[in-house]
Image (tube, helix red, strand yellow):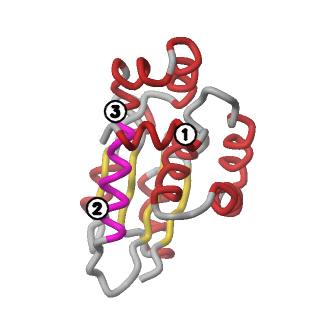
């Protein structure tokens, strides 16, 4: 089955119900902390819908924080002492879910953070790269799916940050 991903800001309950009805969202990956104001009700709405949406909580405090930690103290040190870096390893569970899905119909995964830009872009970039897409294909897909996320990804691709494939490979090697 050809799975699909969607990128978004944190959806309201009403938006989530509409996405479920209109696009058949099967999974929601929430990257926001549970104490963020926009987190309220997302898990509950997922559980209430029929069929329910599978909710995956892969909390990342903020992509900018990750980026600055890498440039200040180095990638390996940032990884070892940063819970957000370690939570990025949860992307592997989504890769496994998509690769091993026994559903007849494709999974439709909505990935979101608060604004749908930095954390969402980082997570989606790693997910697509792990699924075998080239750097160029991944960037094109992100820009096509959500132009603001693609633009932010392009602006943030700087040396010594987590957007470079050597860094992502190192991150995934820790798994």
> Mark number for residue 90?
none
Q: Quadrant of the N terminus?
A: bottom left
Q: Secondary structure at mark 2?
A: strand
User: Where is residue 70 shown, x and y percent of the image?
Assistant: 53, 21
Q: Quadrant of the C terminus?
A: top left
Q: Is residue 40 visible?
A: no
Q: Gap in Å between the C-alphas at discs 2 and 3?
A: 22 Å
Residue for badge 2: 54
Q: Is residue 105 visible?
A: yes
Residue nearest the viewer, comparing 25 with 123: 123
Query: Magenta part mainly helix, strand or loop?
Result: helix
Q: Secondary structure at mark 3?
A: helix
* Range drawn in magenta: 87-99
At 51% from the left and 18% from the top, the residue drawn is 74
User: Where is residue 27 shown, x and y percent of the image?
Assistant: 36, 63
Q: Gap in Å between the C-alphas at discs 3 and 1?
A: 17 Å
**Is 93 positioned to the left or the right of 8 in the image?**
left
At 39% from the left and 73% from the top, the residue drawn is 107
User: In this rendering, is residue 50 above or below 71?
Assistant: below
Residue 57: name its quadrant.
top left
Q: Are marks 3 and 1 in contact (CB under 8 Å)?
A: no
Q: Earlier in the sequence, mark 2 or mark 1?
A: 2
Residue nearest the viewer, comparing 152 with 165: 165
Residue for badge 3: 86
Residue for badge 1: 166
At 58% from the left and 40% from the top, the residue drawn is 115
């Amino acid at each position: 089955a050809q799975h699909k991903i969607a990128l978004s800001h944190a959806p309201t309950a009403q938006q989530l119900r509409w996405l479920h009805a209109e696009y058949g969202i099967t999974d929601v990956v929430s990257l926001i902390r549970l104490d963020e104001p926009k987190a309220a009700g997302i898990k509950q709405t997922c559980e209430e819908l029929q069929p329910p949406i599978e909710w995956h909580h892969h909390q990342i405090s903020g992509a900018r924080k990750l980026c600055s930690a890498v440039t200040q103290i180095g990638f390996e040190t940032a990884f070892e002492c940063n819970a957000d870096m370690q939570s990025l390893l949860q992307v592997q569970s989504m890769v496994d879910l998509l690769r091993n899905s026994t559903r007849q119909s494709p999974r439709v995964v909505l990935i979101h953070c608060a604004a749908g830009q930095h954390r969402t872009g980082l997570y989606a970039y790693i997910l697509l790269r792990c699924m075998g897409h080239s750097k160029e294909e991944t960037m094109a897909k992100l820009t096509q799916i959500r132009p603001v996320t693609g633009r932010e990804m392009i602006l943030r691709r700087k040396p010594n940050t987590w957007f470079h494939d050597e860094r992502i490979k190192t991150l995934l090697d820790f798994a």
